[in-house]
Amino acid sequence: MLLDALSSQGGASSDFDLNKDVVLPEGRKLTPAAVLIAVRANTQTVILTKRSAKLKHHPGQIAFAGGKQDPIDADPTAAALREAHEEIGLDPSFVDVIGTLPAHETVTGYAVMPVIALVDGPFVAVAEAGEVSEVFEVPLAHLMTPANFHVEGRIWQGKIRRYYTIPFGPYYIWGATARILRGLAERMQ
């Protein structure tokens, strides 16, 4: 199912998809980043994090493990694996990378490469307290059902900014994370 999604057509996404009136500057420079869409092979659940409330950027938000691509990273996949190891203790030996989605442009100036991987083995998440307050899992089926997504909006820079959400129990998944998941769900239909 995931392999079929990776082979289907689909373009890049952005935080601006639902906001057609936004004019992005020509020649803007985006910072390379990557996230790991880690799917447990045995339970078909996606591993997500709740960012620490103490962080300067995006405190308390739901996110994939991931972050900025550093000079030591050979490519976005290496960045996603390194960040997942740092943030949730995911040993790369438990990870089988099966592909990537086109980069997602964020309002904060990042080009985020979603790396899709299956996780196997006796992985027990350990949250890095400085960055992650909680690690939890959501059934892949819930995240791949388009009817579970909603469009909401907030005032941002003086205008309504619309974005996807996909609530799950006490978790409010929104913004770039929800948009990336929505793109994957569209590919799986």
Image: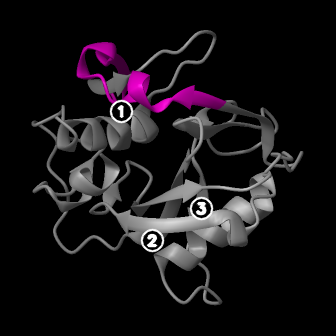
Residue 45, image x, y percentages: 55, 35
In this orientation, which residue lies closer to the viewer: 184 or 164?
Answer: 184
Which tag, 2 or 1, sits closer to the chain's start? 2
The amino acid at mark 2 is Thr
Drawn side of residue 26 relative to residue 167, left or right: left
Q: Which residue is mark 2?
A: 31
The amino acid at mark 3 is Gly
Q: Which residue is mark 1?
A: 157
Q: Quadrant of the N terminus?
A: top left
Please report the residue visible at 10 percent of the width from the left and 37 percent of the height from the top. 20
How far is mark 2 from mark 3, CA to CA? 10 Å
Q: Which residue is mark 3?
A: 67
Callout 3: SS:
strand
Q: Residues within 10 Å of mark 1 (few under 14, many from 20)?
A: few
Residue 89, image x, y percentages: 81, 57
Question: Looking at the image, which residue sits at the far front?
Answer: 42
Residue 52, image x, y percentages: 78, 37
Callout 1: SS:
loop
Start-end of magenta stretch: 137-158
